Image (tube, rainbow, N blue to C red):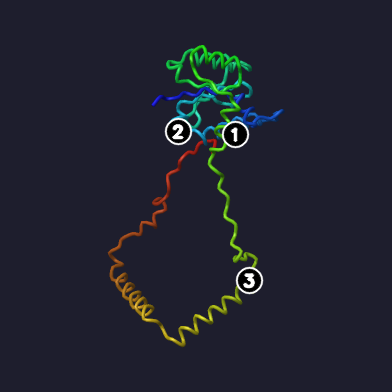
Amino acid sequence: MTREFLIIDGYNLMHAAGMARPNYGPGDLERCRNRLLRFLKSVLSAEARRRTTIVFDAWEPPPGRLSVYSVAGMTVQFADAPGEADAAIEQLIAAHSAPKQVTVISGDRRLQQAASRRKSRFIDSEAWYTRWEHRQPPEETPPSPSPKQNPDLSDQEVDYWLDIFGDIEDAATTENGPTESSRKDHDRSESDLEDDDRRGDDLGDDPMDDPQQGLPDIIDEDFLD
């Protein structure tokens, strides 16, 4: 099967997807970029992400990061100067070793023409986003409480019901006596306790006494999550 390489005009897709803003306060632009990256991460497979490059103009690049870095397997590239993303994408198209396997995501006519010259495919950003927006996994919603549950019972009401059910249990035990299964469970419990007492000296140290055992490894999570 032919592999597809995606080259995405970052800000063009961000605007087409309605993730951009007319004005940006401090940190807003980076938050919008991260929202776009989260979207791409959610709709592209891990294999497709490894063949995806997103190019942004160099407006407020993330502080402390290189101009090219990886996020969730995708390559994120910032152009050398504001307004130079088109030139950077043209260079990527021209230098690609398999241009017929490249798909350019942009509504920019200049980039679409550059893709055509190399016989690469191109898709308008809005059309591509519309194709994928309904394939995002649905957000999990917490289950609604059962109508039979009433979390607002007072302590007095709880005690009242416990007393009633407690009386029923006591009455059943007093009138009918312990059942055959309960007698067997009781006999088994006493036998188990005696066996545990006899084996107690041979068990050694309880592994739970060691606070370092049973602790999960700490795993760094992707900063988009």
Q: On the image, numbered disc 3 is attached to which residue?
A: 155
Q: Earlier in the sequence, mark 3 or mark 2?
A: 2
- Quadrant position of residue 187: bottom left
Q: CA distance from mark 3 to mark 2?
A: 52 Å
Q: Earlier in the sequence, mark 1 or mark 3?
A: 1
Q: 33 or 220: which is nearer to us?
A: 33
SS type, badge 3: helix
Q: Position of residue 217 (x, y in %)?
A: 42, 44
Q: Residue furthest right?
A: 23
Residue 36 vs 121, above or below: the answer is below
Residue 39 vs 4, above or below: the answer is below
Q: Which mark is residue 46?
A: 2
Q: 3 or 155: which is nearer to us?
A: 3
Dot in front, 3 or 2: 2
- Quadrant position of residue 47: top left
Residue 88 vs 146, above or below: the answer is above
Q: Earlier in the sequence, mark 1 or mark 2?
A: 1
Q: Position of residue 102 (x, y in %)?
A: 48, 20
The amino acid pointed to by label 1 is Arg
Q: CA distance from mark 1 to mark 3?
A: 46 Å
Horizontal placement of 196 versus 98: left or right?
left
Q: On the image, numbered disc 1 is attached to which residue?
A: 35
